[in-house]
Image: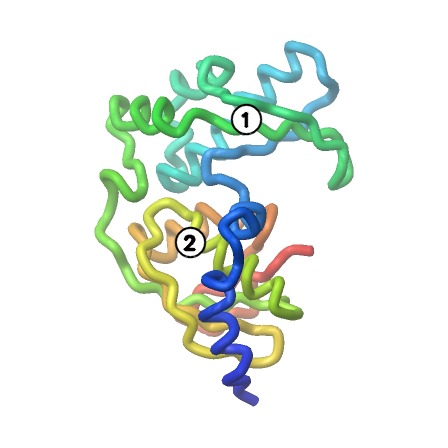
Amino acid sequence: MRLPIAVLFASLVLTALPAAAQTDLAASPYEGRAPVADQSDVARDSGLRNALAEVIERVSGPGSSANAAAIIAGAPQLVQRYAYDNGNGGLQLVASFDKTAVDRQLRAAGLPVWGISSAPAQNTDLVVSGLRGSADYARTLSALRAVPGVRRVAVLGADADHLSLAVDAEGGAARLVGALGNGPQFVRDPNAAPGTLGLRLVR
């Protein structure tokens, strides 16, 4: 059954949120996470390199980290801040990197930077499942709008725990999968209808 009230709320919820709340709903595209064995300098530097590789995959496209070895090696010089998180089943390093410096090095290496020098925008039909309420609607929309290269997110409908969206993004579905489809907020939904990109909200 269609839920027009849910659709209306989903389309308006972000404009009703204060800016600080919107920022808290989704990590920066330039923030990466990596498991580490301990908090030693060796483990930290390895974790920073892995976290930066995750960021590069997100902002430059799937597979791009394979061509960015020199950039990844310099992760300790590009990090702005880092911390440790002992949740989610093990110790993880969470690092935020300098956007300007990362973008500059990617462009110098001839790699795309979504929203700056990348592919034309493509429209993608996206269905996000596993939503339980208004907070999940806000979380989903905010995460999509935080992805570099996403130009427009339009709510098409809501049905039970599914939210149907039309997303204009550079690189289309491949861009969205690379940025969001491998956790920690979303994973690919194997039950999505043919021709539709499906993501499931992770809890």
Q: In the rendered image, which residue does mark 2 sit on?
A: 145
The one nearer the camera, 152 or 120, is: 152
Q: In the rendered image, which residue does mark 1 sit on?
A: 50
Q: Label 2 to label 1, Cα distance in Å?
A: 24 Å
Measuring from the top left, give residue 110's x and y in whole percent. 24, 28
Residue ID at (38%, 50%) = 175
Q: Quadrant of residue 133?
A: bottom right
Q: Quadrant of residue 186?
A: bottom right
Q: Amino acid at mark 1?
A: Asn
Mark 2 or 1, nearer chain start: 1
Measuring from the top left, give residue 16's x and y in whole percent. 50, 63
Q: Is residue 169 above or below residue 36?
A: below
Residue extending farthest top: 41
Q: Secondary structure at mark 2?
A: helix
Q: Is residue 14 left or right of residue 37?
A: left
Q: Is residue 18 left or right of residue 93?
A: left
Q: Quadrant of residue 152?
A: bottom left
Q: Secondary structure at mark 1?
A: helix
Colour logic? rainbow
The one nearer the camera, 178 or 79, is: 79
